[in-house]
Amino acid sequence: MEASAGANVTAHSWSVYSGLTSTIGGSLRENGWRIRVGGGHGAYSYSSTRWTGRDVIVVPFDGTVTFADALIGYQQQWGNLTLKAFAGAAAQHNSVTPVDIESSVRGSRVGAKGAIEAWLNVGTSAFAQLDVNYTTLYDTYASRLRFGYRITPQLSVGPEAGLSGNIDYDSGHVGGFVRYEGALGEISISAGGAGDRSEVTGGYATINALVRF
């Protein structure tokens, strides 16, 4: 079984999340079926122009989101390439203050989710990692691409980039990461610059940890 947890912060949002992955018989390092459950909570803020009936003003909004999913998937390895594919159900609740009647992302919904994770070892000292997921809830999506170089067998560094968003919002980030892998799991820290389609820019930082037992 794997237990994971992490946190992400940007100039206008933060989130914390955790998850569990288990095999349906066999080992996590072997090909086979997987079950994954996870969830988390976060908060975000944004500003948008609104018509009051007499004039246009800029209104600040504050939102919170709680999310969870339950997925079933399969892992297959071909030489240096490992692929994982998951599909299942997702739930999400968004609350915005003051109420934003023009936002599509509000209330509670349940939908479908799919995810693909790929890992490619490039020789003995480098690797590439791609994670992509999509949820029918508000057309929510996220992706992250990493290229890593192993300074030692346990410690690796490299650049990363990603895109995320939903029906109302799109953002991207570019930065770097440090990753340490031990016998029981791994931990990675990343940071860099982020921006969105409204041209709001700032930094981001992420920490993720995984334990195998």
Image (cartoon, helix red, strand yellow):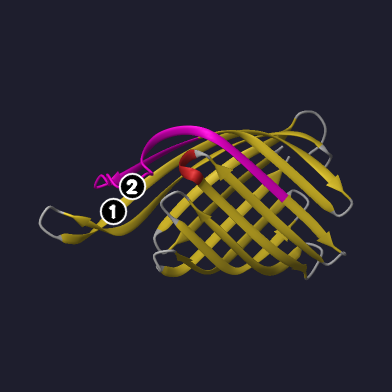
| SS at mark 2 in the image | loop
Instruction: Relative to 37, say whether 99 is above or below.
Output: below
Residue shown at the point (46%, 67%) measured from the top left? 195
Question: Cα distance, mark 1 to mark 2?
Answer: 11 Å
| Amino acid carrying mark 2 in the image | Ser
In magenta, the rendered stretch is 91-117
Identify the residue under disc 1. 61
Q: Left or right? Give the position of 134 relative to 159.
A: left
| SS at mark 1 in the image | strand
The x and y percentages for residue 160 are: 63, 65
Magenta-colored stretch includes residue 113: yes
Of mark 1 and mark 2, the one earlier in the sequence is: 1
Look at the image and tell me in which quarter the C terminus lies: top right
- Asked if the residue under mark 2 is in contact with the one under mark 1, i.e. CB atoms within 8 Å, the reply is yes
Magenta-colored stretch includes residue 99: yes
Number of the label disc, if any, that sits on residue 103: 2
